[in-house]
Amino acid sequence: MKNSVIHLITNRAGDFHHPSLASVTDYTPHTESAEEISLRDFLQLRDQSTDYYVIAAINAVYAFPELVAEFKESQRTFDLSLWSKDDDNITSNGVLNTQDKVFTIHRTPTEFPVQMRWELSYVNGTTMKIRLGDLFWDVNVRTTEDNVMYVDWPEELGISGALNLDNTWSSGDTMTIIHTPTRFPYGRLAEIVTNRDDARRVMIDRNYIRNFYLAQSDIEKCAILYTALAWPEKYEWS
């Protein structure tokens, strides 16, 4: 089957977010079991606002030729090298770069699903609150006379740089950043699915559970999970 890896893992014919995947349309989705529905929802494989989870899934499988062989993929019509993560989407009165302090985020997520929405809330001249999902930080800030805000970013956030503000911030002013990481938390996902009934049932019923526990790395465990969910032995010719 053409593009069988991405089709069978997602059970989607198309509607992918990134233009590099737009040609992947020659597929008719099959009727899913309750476990498949639950597991695909949890793995975020239906999220049409980002391809982050889909790319992570197919990259994991493509890393293991013996798993790719199970899909009997006759052709792949898209080039993964053309895929790039979404640019950060910023809503605020702040411009994120200064001449000497370029604002960047290089965060390695440790949670699943991955939190991508950052909320920065200005408290006063010395303090700002940062929220990422259910996590909160109070950080020190310093604003210069030309409205450049320097922030003591917590190391675990992977943020560097300063905020070049369009105007002076007041208490309660906020900035929202939608940030797609470049890395994927295969380790956390492998840990979570070990205790999920839908994942265990899919892997047990399709004879992948032993390989999952014998896998040599977290990404291999995830690749086996994605392959079990796709079940190419059954669906490859459907």
Image (cartoon, helix red, strand yellow):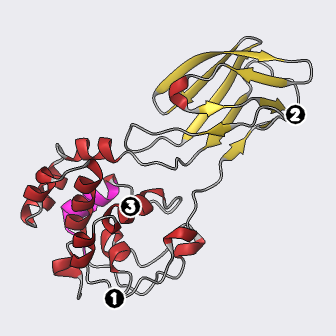
Q: In x, y percent, where is residue 168?
A: 86, 23
Mark-to-mark CA distance, 3 and 1: 23 Å
- Badge 2 is on which residue? 166
Q: Do the residues labelled 3 and 2 touch (CB within 8 Å)?
A: no
- For the stretch drawn in magenta, the main secondary structure is helix
Within-10-Å neighbours for mark 2: few <14, some 14–19, many 20+:
few
Secondary structure beneath label 1:
loop
Which residue corresponds to the image point at 24% horizontal and 78% vertical from the top-left?
Answer: 69
145 or 37: which is nearer to us? Answer: 145
The circle drawn on residue 74 is 1
* Residue 33 visible from this viewpoint: yes
**Number of marks in picture:** 3
Q: In x, y percent, where is residue 208?
A: 12, 62
Which residue corresponds to the image point at 65% horizontal and 48% vertical from the top-left?
Answer: 88
30 or 101: which is nearer to us? Answer: 101
Boundaries of the magenta span: 31-41
Q: Which amino acid does label 1 sit on?
A: Ser
- Badge 3 is on which residue? 45
Mark-to-mark CA distance, 1 and 2: 53 Å
